[in-house]
Amino acid sequence: MKRVLRRSWLTFVVVIAFFGGMAFLIAETLLSASDWVDQAYNGHISGAGGLAQAGSITDRNGDTLAKTVNKERVYHEDKTTRKALLHVVGDNSLNISTAIQSRFRSELTGYSFIWGLNMPKSFRGGRDMQLTVDAKTCKAAYEALSNYDSGACVIYNYNTGEIICSVSVKAYDPNSPPKITKKNEDKYDGVYLDNVLSSTYTPGSIFKIVTAAAAIENIPGVMERKWYCSGKEDIGGGDVTCVGEHGTVNLEQAFGHSCNIVFAELAVELGPEKMNAMAKKMGIKAQFDISGVKTKQGVYSIKNINKNQLAWSGVGQYTDQVNPTQMAILCGAIAKGGKYTKPYIISGESGSILSDLGLSAAGSEGGELVKPSTAKVLQKLMRSAVVNDYGDDMFGGMKICAKTGTGETVKGDEEKNDGWMIGYCTDEDTPLAFACVCHSTDEYGYSSAGKIAKAAMLQARKSLKND
């Protein structure tokens, strides 16, 4: 009797395992078939990195960024534009995993679970894909940014969510991808990484937006207070240095002059918990979804932090790290009064099930990053910085609110900078937020990233007016 019972249980386990395995296989087939087809080693989609049957990719104005001609994948006719949009579009190698051609190869090739890659052309839909980026703006940003070893520039419409510009450096011509060897690997280090989405940098003074917001919400009368900056101050047993001797300043003046002393003192007065809470609320530690790709999470750490480290964290140093897209989104939220609009780069989010069902979240409202009352004060501070410190004519008459930053870094034995400029335009016909960063440069944020922001925003305004 016991032997029969054991055999019955064994049979039961085998049957359960069989049907469980079948269920898993069916689920994997349904959910992952397109991923299997997309693998580069799949001989059925040979040629042009498996893109021989792929549809075209165009920018917001219909300018062709990639298309297939005689089973060969070709890219924009202008070399600079090709390089500018390399990390957005991708190339035949598919080494840039976040690029459109890598992530949406099955949609571009017209793959169907029922028909495979042999779906009749009359039944195919969505093979062509239009993006929200403007090729001319990306080219202008790249021309200014390519003088630097590494960096990024992103511009997005904070009302609609459309990403107008997304440029990452280092880059190469997708028409002739490099052969990376041990001899040239330093030259191409990080070339497959989209810095707009997947990199973080030392923020320097752009982080003073976070410290200012924390002070506005937690220190009564902070806008009426005054501080004295002598250029250097011992805080917590170590010096905090400033870019100059600013004398007696209020918060608005300290923000515009980028006074380290004032913001270091504020961070210490606020304490680590309140600083950490504001960094978290404003999205520094968040990951934002951009058409299916999550931005790299920033860093603000208070673990075992001492007084001097806390002071430096308030001016964007210590271990602080931020992502370019993250900062553009924050600027857009400030411009809108606190809540951000979700960014996207595929027009109508084509190729997604949500889009087919009319449920796409593209351009929908996100959460609150800043209290409306706090956003109003930050708007004033950022506008004052442009008018009184950077020059209101910098952006060709556009009404800009901004903040520059110079994050001090070390490369080998050399001291280098991450130069930043972030901000937004308040003009009704140019509702754009931007973030530009130049990595490992000898320049300050205003002189490095400022040039990139200016070139990109001027072209973006021109392009939007011609839409």
Image (cartoon, rainbow, N blue to C red):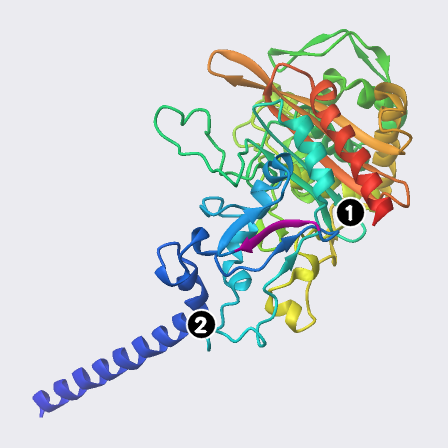
Principal secondary structure, stretch drawn in magenta:
strand
Please say if 23 is above or below 97.
below
Please say if 441 is above or below 1.
above
Residue behind mark 1: 157
Query: Which residue is at a point 57% across and 72% down the rendered structure image?
Result: 124
Query: Which residue is at a point 78% across and 7% down the rendered structure image?
Result: 245
Question: Percent from the top left, x then y, of residue 239?
Answer: 63, 10
Q: Give the range drawn in magenta.
A: 63-69
Question: Percent from the top left, x then y, of residue 195?
Answer: 57, 36
Circle 2 — which element? loop
Magenta residue check for 65: yes
Q: Is residue 182 left or right of residue 440?
A: left
Magenta residue check for 290: no
Q: Counting residues from the N terminus, which is met first, the one under dot 2 or under dot 1?
A: 2
Q: In this view, does 441 lie to the left or right of 62?
A: left
Please say if 56 is above or below 167.
below
Q: Can residue 269 be seen in this view?
A: no
Circle 1 — which element? strand
Q: Of residues 235 and 400, which is closer to you in this image?
A: 400
Q: Is residue 136 left or right of residue 14?
A: right
How far apart are labels 2 and 1 at the CA level?
Answer: 37 Å
Q: Nearer the viewer, mark 2 or mark 1?
A: 2
Badge 1 amino acid? Asn
Question: Percent from the top left, x then y, of residue 51?
Answer: 48, 56
Residue behind mark 2: 116
Query: Which residue is at a point 78% across and 47% down the rendered structure image?
Result: 157
Label ID, residue 197: none
Question: Percent from the top left, x then y, of residue 379?
Answer: 86, 36
Q: Of residues 286 and 52, which is closer to you in this image?
A: 52
Query: Which residue is at a point 52% across and 40% down the rendered structure image?
Result: 174
**Label total for image:** 2
> What is the crowding at mark 2: few (fewer than 14 residues within 10 Å), some, or many (at least 20)?
some
